[in-house]
Image (cartoon, rainbow, N blue to C red):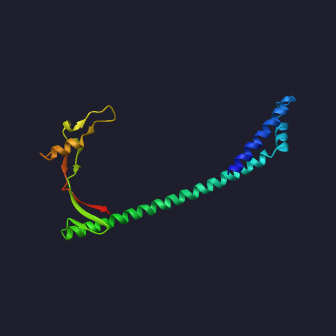
Amino acid sequence: MAEVEFNLARQAEAAKRLMSNLRSQGVDDDQELVADTIEGGTTLLEAIQAALAEIDECEIHIIGLKAKEAEFAERRRRLEERAGRVKATIEQAMITTEQESFRLPTATLTLTKRAPGLIVTNEADIPTRFWIEQERPAPKLDKKALRAALDDQPIPGATLDNGSRSLSIRRK
């Protein structure tokens, strides 16, 4: 590719010198004569053809690479889903056997209880004290304050889930 660029630049410079010579001879506005002189005195047109072929080849590679990227992204997504299913199966096995942790030669697995998460059932029912005023586009819900308040009392429009279990895997 560098050769194509170098040759094109070299031929453009040669054509520039030819045009300068023509101008010094008083030929400025005869486009046909300038084009014929450039075509006859340089290989600029061939260099441009080679550059266009190089562009075509690059575009073909780009199309192929994009297709491979999409294929690899799909493959990565399937592998992530598979890993998630296997992790969930380990988690269920630990819950079923009532084991909070396992120490293995290659990893330590631990089940932890997560705090209950916020569930917004109807934003319109949530009291205004849980909304933060903003210029644009609209007030923002202060989820942290709402979550903390739900520990003490029920709040209309929101509730907490039951919490969940989470599997932590530490590799050795």
Q: Left or right: 52 with respect to 117?
A: right
Lateral position of residue 84 relative to residue 161, left or right: right
Residue reaching furthest to the left: 153
Instruction: Count the marks.
Output: 0
The location of residue 45, given as percent across then percent down, is 78, 46
Residue at 73%, 45% in the rendered image: 8
Q: Which residue is at a point 20% across and 65% down the rendered structure image? A: 100
Tell me the quarter of the picture where residue 17 sits: top right
Question: Where is residue 46 drawn, in percent x and y?
Answer: 77, 49
Is residue 148 placed above or below 20 in the rendered structure?
below
Q: Nearer the viewer, residue 127 or 54?
A: 54
From the top left corner, tell me how far across and down residue 57 is, in percent.
65, 55
Q: Image check: 172 left or right of 30?
A: left
Name the residue furthest right. 25
Apparent side of residue 21 relative to residue 163 in the rendered image (left or right):
right
In-front residue for pair 124/62? 62
Image coordinates of residue 48 in percent, x first then y, are: 74, 47
Identify which residue, 102 or 166, lies in the foreground: 102
- Is residue 51 in sight in this rendering? no
Question: For the C terminus, which image quadrant?
Answer: bottom left
Q: In the rendered image, is residue 33 in sight?
A: yes
Q: Which residue is drawn at 82% across and 41% down?
A: 38
Between 172 and 44, the one lying in front of the other is: 172
Q: Height in image: 50 above or below 109?
A: above
